Image (tube, grey):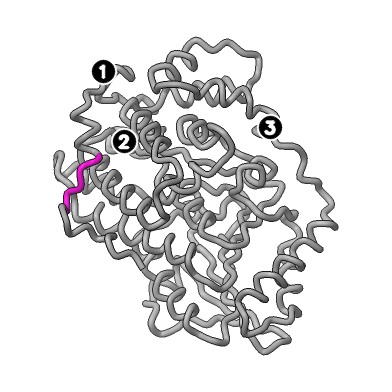
Amino acid sequence: MTNLVDKAAHSFATQHVVFQTLATASGKLVGVVTLNVEKALNALDLDMVRAMTVQLNLWKKDPLIACVVLDGSGEKAFCAGGDVRALYHASVAAQGQVTEVAKVFFEEEYRLDYLLHTFGKPVLVWGDGIVMGGGLGLMAGASHKVVTETSRIAMPEVTIGLYPDVGGSYFLNRMPGKMGLFLGLTAYQMNAADACYVGLADHYLNRDDKELMFDAMATLDWSDSPALNHQRLDSMINELSNQVDIPKGDSLLAESQEIIDRLMAGSLTDIVSRMSSLRTEEAWLNKACATMLAGSPISWHLAYIQSQLGTKLSLAQCFKWELTVSVNVCAKGDFSEGVRALLIDKDKQPKWQFADVQSVPNRVIEDMLTSPWGEEHPLSQLS
């Protein structure tokens, strides 16, 4: 691969996001985006979001680019989420007011996610290692989501007083049974088999197959037809999948669908009560339960309301709903306290605004769902 950072993407891109192109025998190019903040587990900040948006829009229009690949530097993570420190500091300083920092970051992050969902050309995400939060937002938008034996995938927002955003309103509600709500409330870490079961992954390869995959992409007969390129990429990855050394294994979530559906049935109060009184010898379920119960009661309410949206909202409408909720949670919810406890002071002892599920007043949740923009919502004309 040769470095090819387009002039339109500012110089910061060469530090925290690297753009390259892979020449292919067909004469077409594969654009490769590498998140390059290994020490921070490739967490996304606003500059990275902006650089990627500029470059991807250029590649979307470039007839030479047949396909795009997103991956992360290092062996630990594709992307562990968004870099929330700037959001935290702005929220603390604003004392209950919606900040410009939150408005700008979430709007631009969701626009990037939406661009990936609607890219047209094949977009492959190499989901090796940790894929969480904002990283899962990127992967969910890809047409070809590849996971490996090291993949650990989760939506852990409940632990920092947020809720499963970055399109979670869309993809969580399209999972089997009550699985989306379970993942949103418990921050359960999925492996490759789990991710394939719930629809967050399309293909399974081994970590060591990455170079084989790129070599195969270089010899693929890419065409001018995006539809044909999707098919050819599918066939190529399926062929590699049949030759993996380490098998994918079984999905614990698939085996536990009935249990999860029972646990997540009924009202939010029912669910919290059921999880609070759960007695099981299953270590994974105990961990999921403990994580949920240590989370923010405001976050529980938001994740539950999100699950009630069902499948009636379009992808664009989901991102619009999320932008409203996200900026409000940063201003008035438990976000600042959650980030303080986990990432700033690291005492892991958050003091949530409300002690339990029934203490959260309706007006607090209504505030979270009320747009600060009125009729002029920034994502009203998402395209």
Q: Disc 2 to disc 1, how far (Cα)?
A: 22 Å
Looking at the image, tell me whether mark 1 or mark 3 is earlier in sequence order: 3
Instruction: Determine whether the residue tagged by mark 3 lies in a helix, strand or loop.
Output: helix
**What number is the disc on residue 340?**
2
Q: Where is residue 318 in the image (x, y as percent from the top left)?
A: 37, 50
Q: Disc 2 to disc 3, how far (Cα)?
A: 33 Å
**Would you say 256 lies left or right of 358 here?**
right
Asked whether disc 2 touches disc 1, contact meaning CB atoms under 8 Å apart, the reply is no
* Residue positioned most to the front: 312
Q: Position of residue 317 (x, y in %)?
A: 35, 53
**Would you say 134 lies left or right of 229 here?**
left
Q: Residue at image x 38%, y 18%?
A: 269
Identify residue for label 1.
359
Q: Residue at image x 49%, y 53%?
A: 135
**The N terminus appears in which quarter of the rendering?**
bottom right
Q: Where is residue 273 in the image (x, y as percent from the top left)?
A: 43, 13
Looking at the image, tell me whether mark 2 or mark 1 is earlier in sequence order: 2
The amino acid on which the numbered mark 2 sits, given as a three-letter code, is Arg
Looking at the image, tell me whether mark 2 or mark 3 is earlier in sequence order: 3
Q: Give the range drawn in magenta.
A: 369-373
**The C terminus appears in which quarter of the rendering?**
bottom left
Vertical arrangement, residue 58 with respect to residue 158, above or below: below
Vertical arrangement, residue 4 with respect to residue 48, above or below: below
Identify residue for label 3.
252
* Residue positioned most to the bottom: 27
